[in-house]
Amino acid sequence: MWNSLDTGAQDGLLAEVIAIPAHNGDWIHAYWARPAGPGPHPAVVAVHHMPGWDEYYREFTRRLAAHGYNVICPDLYHRFGHGTPDDVAARARAAGGLSDDSAVGDLVAAAAYLRALPSSNGKVGIIGTCSGGRHAYLIAGRHPDAFDAVADLWGGRVVIRPEELTDTMPVAPLDYTQNLTAPVLGLFGNEDANPSPAAVDTLEAELTKHGKEFEFHRYDDAGHGFFYHDRPAYRQQQAMDGWDKVFAFFAKHLT
Amino acid sequence: MCTYINKQTDIAGSGKGADGWFPLSRLTVAFDHPVAAQLGHAVLVDIQDPHTGGRIALELDIASATALAETLQAAIAEAQLTGLAE
């Protein structure tokens, strides 16, 4: 839980940009953070959102590490070049966006990297917000053996109409639900339109239909991105409760 | 992308950024999360040259993006009447 640290304990974390082998044999940058102790530690792959591999996600990664996890946040936009996060995100948009295959390949590689570490306890989860939540759900369905827990924070377009499918997004993540083996945590704002409450209902029904283990938390007076303290969408009470849900979920399934 | 609303087309022209003029070759219009505008979602207009990295970026609410589109179309319509349009 937030702010439950022991003020008398030796504590710390390490964090820096590294390079990891990824999709198609490419080496991509990743933000890597881990507790200072030798472990063993559970691990989490953090999947950045549409605005990019940005400062929010570096803080997000460090927060998870401060709570006891080896964490990697791959730069899914690495192949579009480097610069400020918004310039790189614009370049990604100009190229038609990030393909699902590229994201899935990079995230599976990140999980393998974490699992191979001598400080690994053998468990790896995945968490993403926004398009990152969609990627987390997608990859857990396409590669059910890669992750031991999945946290989808308001991932939009997990439920989509067939006419909305594209070359870079050819299959709705919902359609992979039957393949899931890991438990799923979902956090959603009831004022969000993408995903809407109806879309979350559809997702919940699909998980129930296939007998999957999941827990959803749906927040009133919260819309899309309610964790983002740098954006107008931030909702303090809902975000703090959401973080408690994330830590409790990962503690239950990864430790 | 979050909404996955993202349109691109090739263009030609010049743009001026912080470092001066640069050639333009690519227009992208998306509707998704802005970085600076205090909106949940915005029309994101990027006019850029991928080779040099030059970029002109706009983040507009729907009303402003509509006004931009309508003003552009009105000016283009008058320009085409002049016989000078290239």
Image (cartoon, coloured by chain):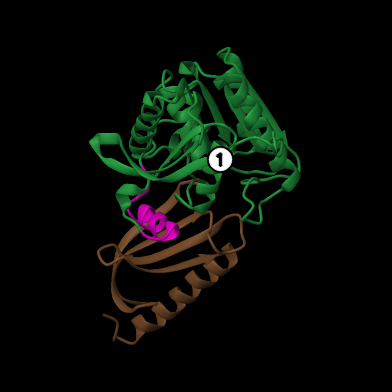
For chain A, what colour was chosen?
green
Color used for chain B? brown
* Residue A85 seen by the camera: yes
Is A95 magenta? The answer is yes
Q: Which residue is mark 1?
A: A12
Residue at 43% across / 28% down in the picture?
Answer: A139
State the quadrant of the C terminus of chain B. Answer: bottom left
Please tell me whether residue B71 is drawn above or below residue A63 in the rendered image: below
Q: Residue A225 in magenta?
A: no
In this orientation, which residue lies closer to the viewer: A180 or A199? A180
Q: Is residue B50 left or right of residue A237?
A: left
Give the x, y percent position of residue B24.
30, 70
> What secondary structure prevails in the magenta region?
helix
Q: Position of residue A110 (x, y in %)?
A: 38, 32
**Vertical side of A247 occupied by A233: above or below:** below
Q: Quadrant of residue A185?
A: top right
Residue at 56 percent of width and 30 percent of height? A151
Q: Residue A101 in the image: x percent, y percent?
A: 34, 34
Q: Nearer the viewer, residue A243 or A34?
A: A34
Q: How many marks?
A: 1
Up-down relation of residue B43 to residue B4 (above or below): below
Q: Which residues are magenta?
A: A83-98
Furthest-top residue in view?
A: A211
